[in-house]
Image: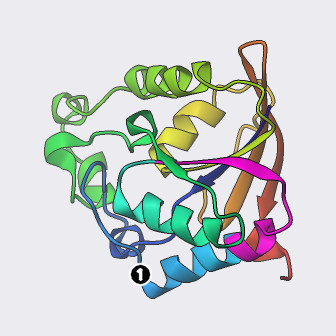
Amino acid sequence: MDLLFMRHGQTLWNQQRRLQGHQDIPLTPAGLQDGESLSEYLKDYPIQLLFSSPLSRAYQSAELINRHHRLDIQVDSDLIERDYKACSGLLYDEYRNLPIGERSAIESDEAVYQRALNFLSRMSDSGMAAIVTHGGFLSNLLYRSEASPDKLKIEHRCIYWCTWAEHELELKAVIDLNEVSL
């Protein structure tokens, strides 16, 4: 099965470099344009399923991507961002300067990865699926893929094309729309 993973469009907290976690921060005008760009690029792809995290920044992005496909967007709570708990809203630098004990109170990498595996376990060979999720979720999933480059950055306006077969995820390509003329 082909899976097209995407990070939601930009939010104000992304611009400010804040941890969002489960906070429901809307897209900025640039974030809406991110979704429009993904929609335009993917308009001729044979997408048969469309999944989104329940957070509005991902769902808004999925709605924009869906403009050409007119699919039922399937909201899946396993796709939600890492729970940063009391650290949500902190700047990245503030978070890095916290004592280790306070930083470890967030949802663990292993818990996020297990949610990703739960989501993938429900995938059947139904063709191509587009999945709109979050940076923390994608990094936990893709960094563990054997084909993932060491320095893979999870960016807005990027498509992470993977295959899922026999319980194995393989990253096939990264399509960076910042480098593609639409």
Residue 179 position, x and y percent, is 82, 74
Q: Quadrant of residue 3?
A: top right
Please, which residue is most extreme toward the top here? 166
Whether residue 14 is in magenta: the answer is: no
Please, which residue is most extreme toward the bottom here? 29
Whether residue 44 is in magenta: the answer is: yes
**Left or right: 99 in relation to 49:** left
The relative height of residue 25 versus residue 118 in the rendered view (above or below) is below
Residue 115 position, x and y percent, is 45, 25
Q: Quadrant of residue 123?
A: top right
Q: Residue at x 31, y 55 (%)?
A: 19
Residue 162 position, x and y percent, is 77, 38
**Left or right: 67 in relation to 13:** right
Q: Residue at x 60, y 25 (%)?
A: 120
Q: Residue at x 38, y 22 (%)?
A: 111
Total labels drawn: 1
Q: Residue at x 35, y 73 (%)?
A: 16
> How busy is the neighbourhood of tag 1: few (under 14 within 10 Å), some, or many (20 plus)?
some
**Residue 4 visible in the snapshot:** no
**Left or right: 69 in relation to 179:** left
In which quadrant will I find the N terminus?
top right
Residue on which disc 1 sits: 28
Residue 135 position, x and y percent, is 50, 50
Q: Quick one: SS at disc 1?
A: loop
Which residues are the magenta region? 39-52
